[in-house]
Image (cartoon, coloured by chain):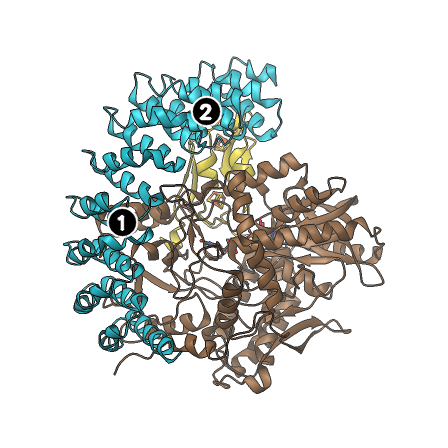
Chain colours: A cyan, B brown, C yellow
Amino acid sequence: MAERLASADAAERRVAVLDLAESADQGAEPLLVGALEDRDAGVRREAAKALAQFDGRPAAEALARTLLDDDASVADAAACSLTEMKSPEAAKPLLALVAHDRAGVRGAAWRGLRNLRVEASLKPALKALADPDARVRREAVGVLAYLKNVATLTALTGAADDENFEVRRAAISALAFASSGQALDPIAKGLSDVHWQVREAAAILAGKIKAAGAAPWLVGALFDEAWQVSGKAALALGEIKAREAIHALGGLLSHPASNLRKDAVTALGEIGHADALPYLEQATMDADPDVRKIASWSIHRILSARAK
Amino acid sequence: MAELDDAADLFEADVLVIGGGTAGPLAAYKAKSANPGLKVVLLEKANVKRSGAIAIGMDGLNNAVVPGFATPEQYVREITIANDGIVYQKAVLAYAMRSFDMIRELDDWGVKFQKDENGDYDVKKVHHLGSYVLPMPEGGGVKKILYRQLRKAQVLISNRYMATRLLKASDGRIAGAVAVNSRTAGVLVIRAKAVILATGAAGRLGLPASGYLWGTYENPTNSGDGYAMAFHAGAELTNLECYQINPLIKDYNGPACAYVGGPFGAYTANSRGARFIECDYWSGQMMLEFRKELEGGNGPVFLKFDHLADETISEVEGILHSVERPSRGLFHEGRGDNYRRDMVEMHISEIGFCSGHSASGVWVDEHARTTVPGLYAAGDMASVPHNYMLGAFVNGAIAGEDAAVAAASTELQSYDPQDVETERARMRRLLDNKDGLPANQVEYKIRRFVNDYLQPPKITRKYEIAQKRFAEIREDLQRIVARDPHELMRALEVHSILDCADMAAAASLFRTESRWGLYHYRVDYPEQDDENWFCHTQLFKDERGAIALKKRPVDPYVVPLESGEKGAYQRLRIPAPV
Amino acid sequence: MSFAENPSEFPVKIDQGKCIADKGCTVCVDVCPLDVLRINPETGKAHMRYDECWYCLPCQLDCPTKAVTVTIPYLLR
Ligand SMILES: Cc1cc2nc3c(=O)[nH]c(=O)nc-3n(C[C@H](O)[C@H](O)[C@H](O)COP(=O)(O)OP(=O)(O)OC[C@H]3O[C@@H](n4cnc5c(N)ncnc54)[C@H](O)[C@@H]3O)c2cc1C
Ligand code: SF4
Ligand code: SF4
């Protein structure tokens, strides 16, 4: 094998790397690490891909070095393999790169760190929320989100105000480990964001953490210009069983988007209050079978709960 | 001209797993890890690295039972109702109990499931009652990951071997199998103490509307060999009349993936762009509704994305064009179709056997045991309903563990050498034929007759004609010419296909009622008849070697349905307002 | 046996310039579930030997030199 790896023919070296990758043998690891230094980019790329199967320090160190490879496709392969690492030992070489000059390298290092969930990431990730590059800030949000540490709530709430919409969306989604009171502010701001996907994320968050306090804004969001946002707001109102939303939800039952009528009728069923019955009756005549189905199922549930 | 390798190789193993797709790798891995001292062999017609239904990954779990989203009992109830009550609940429960642990184990191995921003499983609600869909937008690497685990566990892998018949001892216990190499035509006899069948669905039964033999919904290597082998070994097969029929992208014949598009807001619509399906699951009921719409004034049927936001469509495309059936993107591109503008035309698939969406297959209990001692079955060919990928993994694991225990306490059984001789003669004849029929023509003819006569709605007279035609073609099987080992494999597959066609016809004629929506819609018996037919139908080989059938009562439920529960579910299907 | 030679448009094309089968690569041949690819002994390169393709793409995705192009078989296109 060593001989094949030293062949003068790049294609032969590449085939040797493929065979090594296949062997699933521990002895292959050092050879693959060596192949990361090959003069042919194709060979390096194949080796970087193959190292994904070796979880731990040596592979992680070698791959982290490869993030600096001049060939973008080799660096990408290394970044991709690094996201496969599970062992916390892989964290050290990655943490060494989170302040690298190149934004691509910083981002890739953070992406690799997310899954590892090591406490040592926490402080530098908080700092990285101020990185000049939006992609890096987005990855840092991901790392913090996985750590689910309440100490990061303020910082994540701050990131929900980021100038970049992907960062805002990620930060809002990340707050699902907060208590319903803690996330009210970002929910309110998120629901009035200029970008519909951020507003949608805020509505989803409200439903997930059952933020009862957000009901008034959610009712407002029922009339969002994007039906996707209204739908998620409706579902959230169902989750928090907001009785005050029944009439507004009932109003949505004549909306042209059947997906939105479906969300509205689902919410009415979840709220489960008799006040919704007239609307639900109306919905049993809807043109859309899903809407009809959920309506009559909800009526059945409300009536049998009342009978008990 | 290829020669049959006359010095048949003989190999001895403790556990033999046949089929290295989805259930097979898990079976082999679990048997080996349960008892590393065992010799475990995994035999695969293709190459385990990229074989089976999940060769190129999967885009989601359809039936994940994740705590907080659904309970095993709730799952068992829903599956019971979705199958009109005819299920062996213990096996469904055994799956549901292990579903979540399996997800976590796969996750540890590196299989990627969709997580929310905080790293928790992002389970989606697609059905009305429970939430069971766990997307896998990056699920492309599943097979490579399994392969790595198998290598690490030192399972012996034999690629490019097609198993053709099982071997039994005189007392009826399993003794091993005969296989042939598709590159060399070398015959291999493997003796084993336990054998696990995991050869997938019977996907080459009906002919796709395109007429292309290989344009099937299922991976075409799944030609029904497992069903044929189990039958010839004397195992019982159950409910085979409950066919698999799926709603697919027309011509491309791959899943349109309502399960992927659904959580994003896409849906199946008629030509007016309106939703029409009343039923939730991919079930016979749904297929009946689908067919009505397809053929009615509002037809044909489409998958509708064009009402979604551009960003959403890009995200869906990213998934649909990279995992599961990634050539879907190429197909749309070739026709100039764009989800943003065009609805995707859909159609009904050819028929097949598969327990994925119906409760049919080789009968197994909650330990994945068939009715032949020492023989197991798992995955799409085994009778646990609505299993899909995760079910194949879990039941493969159950089979592997049970087989490991059985193998540790049994001896290798002796088999009748004459059985091997008969099998070799069957192959030799095909290779020796100098003149005769090409396999693809015989296959085409069988599958065209399957479409002409067996495709539901089922009509008794048509079925009788089909049986006559199949009997005629059986004579032709001997005349197939195999010029090389590859053609020998294809010819042997045609034998399995004909066996499956015969079983499909016989099972359908036996059940004189209609049930499971389109799957078993008999025009001459249009009503469901619970009094006489609330039972499984078991198909087996009688003493004369012919197909026989009998009823098997449904076992008492372990998860009883609450009174009125079935009615409540029915209430979900409300007729359209007049 | 007498057999007809019918023309066929193979759905799988292999770029002979890129293929490194002559250096020992057999990746596409190994991964094809339908076992329809072979190394041509005359050219030392991979080629499609049997027209039986599930357009599933492992051959194309796994080829280390991107030499394989799969098209949808004409009958379904
Ligand atoms: C296109 C498609 C999309 C799907 N989408 C989803 C989804 O999104 N989610 C989900 O959960 N499920 C999905 N499924 C279902 C799921 O993939 C299957 O239920 C599951 O993979 C079946 O596993 P199996 O082991 O039974 O069969 P397979 O994985 O198909 O394996 C059978 C293996 O047996 C081998 N074999 C066949 N005959 C022989 C023989 N004679 N000798 C030796 N080997 C043999 C075959 O080569 C194959 O490798 C989908 C299926 C298909 C076809
Ligand atoms: S995988 Fe690519 S390089 Fe290798 S043999 Fe096939 S076509 Fe040639
Ligand atoms: S697309 Fe699939 S079936 Fe066709 S040649 Fe490639 S691997 Fe084989």
Measuring 41% from the left and 57% from the top, which residue is drawn there?
Answer: B253
Residue placed most toward the observer, A200 or B59: A200
Residue position marked by numbered label 1 in the rendering: B313
Position of the N terminus of chain A, as image quadrant, is top right
- A53 and B473: which one is in front? A53
Residue B176 sits above or below residue A71 on the image: below
Q: Residue B237, labelled with which disc?
A: none
* Residue depicted at 69% across the width and 60% down the height: B369
> What's the chain of the residue with tag 2?
A
The image position of residue C20, as x and y in percent, is 49, 26
Q: Is residue B120 left or right of residue B413?
A: left
Across and down, in percent, residue A133 comes to 24, 25
Q: Amino acid at mark 2?
A: Ala
Residue A302 appears in the picture as rendered: yes
Q: Residues within 10 Å of mark 1 (few under 14, many from 20)?
A: many
Q: Which residue is mark 2?
A: A91
Residue B448 position within the rendered picture, expressed as x and y whole percent measured from the top left: 50, 67
The quadrant holding residue A216 is: bottom left
Residue B144, visible in the rendered structure: no
Q: Is residue B367 left or right of residue B210?
A: right
**Frontmost residue, B409 versus B238:** B409
Mark 1: which amino acid? Ile
Q: Is residue B543 above or below residue A28?
A: below
